[in-house]
Image (cartoon, rainbow, N blue to C red):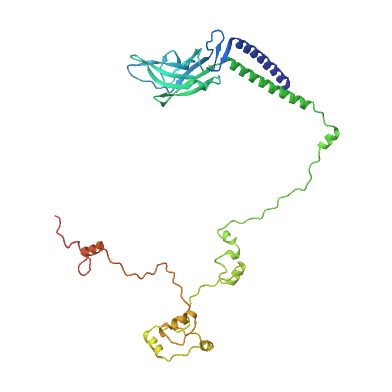
Amino acid sequence: MSAVDDVAARIQRLEASHALKSQQLRQLQHELRYNPLTGVDERLDSGQSAAKLEFKVDGGRNVLFKAGFLSGQRTYIRVTVECVAADGGTLMERQVTTKTPVGYTPRWNEVLVFQGLPAAVGTLRLDVMQEERIGADEVVGTFMMPLASLQHQRRVEKWQVLKKHDKDLISELLFSCRFNRSPISAMELEMELLQNQVNELHLFVGRHQNLVGMPQPSSAMATMASAKPLQGVEVVAESMPERTASTRFSAVASFPPAMRKREFTENISTMNVEMQEAPRAKRQRVADTEKQVNSLSDRIANWLMPTSTGTPRATAVAKADPSTPQVDGSTAEGTGMVSSQFFPFKQRQTTSAPRKARRTGRPLTSAPPKTPSALQAIEKWLFTDKEGKPRELPFGRQAPSY
């Protein structure tokens, strides 16, 4: 049997199931009706709800029970369902399982069924109980879930964590439940899923028939299909040159000569040409070309010497424009001209270039020393004598404490 034949047989089975479900749906529609207000199906003859909740509890793990003289040795599950009725009231139904011995992993494996729930809005509550010899039974753990989480009408099976006083415990409970609130909607959903599967299989069969029914290619097409393989020259990889072992000087040798700082330092012009840079002028200290006068006697001797008439250039300038007013020595110095008067104490400043301030990093302050504060004066009076020498002990010699 080919794959297509198998698909055809499966299509027949799905269509038969779809026909059977359709017949069951028509029968349910004659018996039930859907109530959109409560969200459940109701019977046509009595008006009672047809909703059903199936609950199966398997067991637990890490369940901690009380130990004591009054504590019992058996446990059970109490299931409570609370629903909101159509009149606004609350309907509560409760069922319990059989009692089993207490332990870390108790087992029940029981099924509880709740029939005729009035609405799909409510709460499902599970309580793990421990039997007590005197008084009410003890609640070991609780789990609550809304019925709205079961609206899909599918079975839910999962380990759930128990709580006590709104705090999570290490105890867990395994159970499964299904809320069949509307048999009509559940049947319609099953029929829709079956129809979708049938449509997909019909599409698969149609594609297969289209592929099988395509015409075979002619001889010319076959010749064109068998194209010649690509022809080309084989590329041979070039042999890589042998590389010597790397040393710590290989990184320095890899730089161009112009980038090496400690080489070719003697020939600065060659280095500047290689680096394509202009030669840099070094900073030089300004040297005074005139004789420096240091002592007072030399200054007085220079002052007593006969005065010079100035340079010929200065005389020519003075004769060319006699109308210009005469300026003193300080003004001539500012303009760079030599005056006819001679000032021995300002001889160094006539031709020497102005010096720049030395970059020492410290501000030049000529402020007088600050007056010591009162605290400093008291400290000096306590720890120094009249001559300013430090005392041997504060307040003179003191007698020993013993």
Q: Is residue 298 above or below residue 170?
A: below
Q: Residue at x 45, y 19 (%)?
A: 125
Q: Nearer the viewer, residue 210 or 333?
A: 333
Residue lying farthest to the bottom in this orientation: 306
**Image quadrant occupied by the N terminus:** top right
Residue furthest top as drawn:
45
Residue 255 position, x and y percent, is 59, 61
Measured from the top left, where is residue 95 in percent x and y? 45, 13
Q: Is residue 279 above or below residue 72?
A: below
**Which image quadrant: the C terminus?**
bottom left
Residue 23 position within the rendered picture, expressed as x and y whole percent measured from the top left: 65, 11
- Residue furthest to the front: 323
Count of numbered labels shown in the rendering: 0
Q: Quadrant of residue 77?
A: top left
Residue 313 in percent (x, y) is at: 53, 87
Q: Nearer the viewer, residue 121 or 354?
A: 121
Q: Is residue 220 above or below residue 345?
A: above
What residue appears at the point 41 percent right and 19 percent down from the top-left corner?
103
Is residue 113 or residue 171 the one in the foreground? 113
Q: Quadrant of residue 292?
A: bottom left
- Horizontal arrangement in the rendering, residue 138 relative to residue 267 (left or right): left
Q: Is residue 68 left or right of residue 16?
A: left
Report the front residue among 27 and 5. Answer: 27
